[in-house]
Image: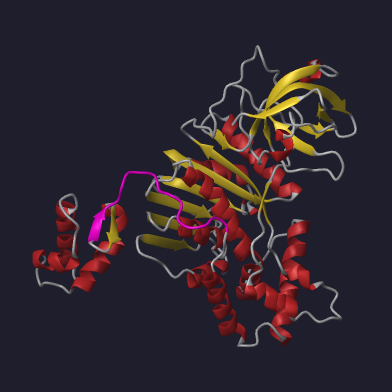
Amino acid sequence: MNDDQRSQILDTARYLQNVRPIDPEELRDYVEGHPHPAAIRQVLREHAFDLGMVEREEGFVPVTDEPIAVNGPVGRVPDDLDHRLEALLVERFGRHWATGESATTLRETITRLKADYFDGAPVAYDAVTALAYAIYHLYDNYAVMQHAIGSLIEAGLVPHHCRILDVGAGVGGPAMGALELLSDGLIDYHAVEPSPAISVFERLWEGRPNQTVHFHESTAESFEPTGEYDLLVFANVLSELDDPAATLDRYAEHVADDGSCLLLAPADRNTATELRTLERGLADNGAFTVYDPTLRLWPNESPGSDVESWSFTIQDDIATPSVQRQLADSTPTESDQEPTAFSNTDVQYAYSVLRPDGRRRTELKPNSDQFTRMADSGSVVSDRVDLVAVKLSHDLSSENPLFLIGDGSQQTDHFAVVVRETGLNKALITAPYASVLAFENVLVLWNADESAYNCVVDDEVVVDRIA
């Protein structure tokens, strides 16, 4: 098909798109040479995002302006993804990839990846390393992304006509999790990844109508984003960048005015607290507002530099993927490694959502006549006060329930500790992560050992979930 025919197809589609569904069979009558409907359909698919049209049974129709809805269960990894990864393992190592020398290589590679990560050492990816990473991290990353983007979809903040930039896309776990939930939309997805992991992603991605994935084999530092994106994603990559703050700032300039920037990091202390530091830097310059979870409840306030904010959420475990189970089952009994070392089903992660439009997950603005700011905790030590705060952890103690809390003004970490649970304060224990809570008559104490404030919840305290 020549350029003139392509232009005729696109011009006709633009003319008819608001009149009736565009049928490739009908469109051939408008194009010189009457190309085959299949060729016309392919041209329309290639240009669907720019045309703003989705392919349906009745033909190509304009995409709706309404926000997209969640499609399918959140956090459940489909079996066919497991099958596709196993097909790559069989192609590389043969049918018995999970036994013998190939299994030993994969186990050693996974062990090295984990050790390098905890040591903060850079990881050099080759084809085998990328496959080992996929075995261990494809599935939890898929589930994490679905939980993270699912809350944005439920809030009506992801459009049907959606352009996404994924920086450090890896083997594609986050991307495929997002694209599954967005399967009813018209999606233009850009994946940036410099390592051989991108080849694994390309092989695992089977494609679907109305979704186009562009693979950019490039480092985050050298890639030049163009235009605006409805969603900018940095998933488990910020800690690997030479200058994450500068890189994040450069990409953030390309977030649409009503778009979102989603930062994800593993739940360990170093990466989770680094994410909060980068979040504060992006929010403090005034161009972005923290949408979720570390809300700044008080106007013109921001957390201090002494706030560590090791904050992460925990979701239900995923089912053990077949490839992990096979590798674990073949672990020799004399091995130094436990078989469970090759199973990764936890869904625990730190996240931040920031937006340039000033929107927050809740628009609550506390009354200063009623509530004490955490920035003023030093002046109310040993007093009972009323606070409003976000619950920023799950239970951190094996004894008295203990939770990290914050209102966005705190200059050091604050913890709520339950010394006597009652029906009037149990909301602290039962409320989900990121809930906004009101504390009435809570006792503020300074914990010198932890250099933090303890907000003591006893039988004189009332805790209500208000958002």
Q: Residue at x 22, y 72 (%)?
A: 39
Residue 41 or residue 9, whichever sits in front = 41
Q: Seen from this angle, which residue lies furthest right? A: 449
Residue 49 drawn above or below residue 451: below
Most common secondary structure along the magenta stretch: loop
Q: Position of residue 240 (x, y in %)?
A: 65, 54
Q: Residue at x 56, y 62 (%)?
A: 173
Magenta span covers which residues? 59-75
In the rendered image, residue 69 lying in the magenta stretch gets the answer yes
Q: Picture quarter containing residue 66?
A: top left
Residue 15 drawn above or below residue 340: above
Q: Quadrant of the C terminus?
A: top right
Q: Position of residue 273 (x, y in %)?
A: 71, 43
Residue 460 or residue 454, whichever sits in front = 460
Q: How is the image coloured?
A: secondary structure
Residue 145 drawn above or below residue 203: above
Residue 13 drawn above or below residue 249: below
Residue 220 appears left or right of 96: left
Residue 148 appears left or right of 369: left
Q: Residue at x 63, y 74 (%)?
A: 322
Q: Picture quarter containing residue 280?
A: top right
Q: Residue at x 58, y 78 (%)?
A: 86
Q: Quadrant of the N terminus?
A: bottom left
Residue 392 or residue 398, whichever sits in front = 398
Q: Examine the rendering and report whether any part of residue 218 can be seen.
A: no
Q: Position of residue 328 (x, y in %)?
A: 74, 75
The total number of labels drawn is 0
Q: Picture quarter containing residue 281?
A: top right
Q: Examine the rendering and report whether any part of residue 449 can be seen.
A: yes
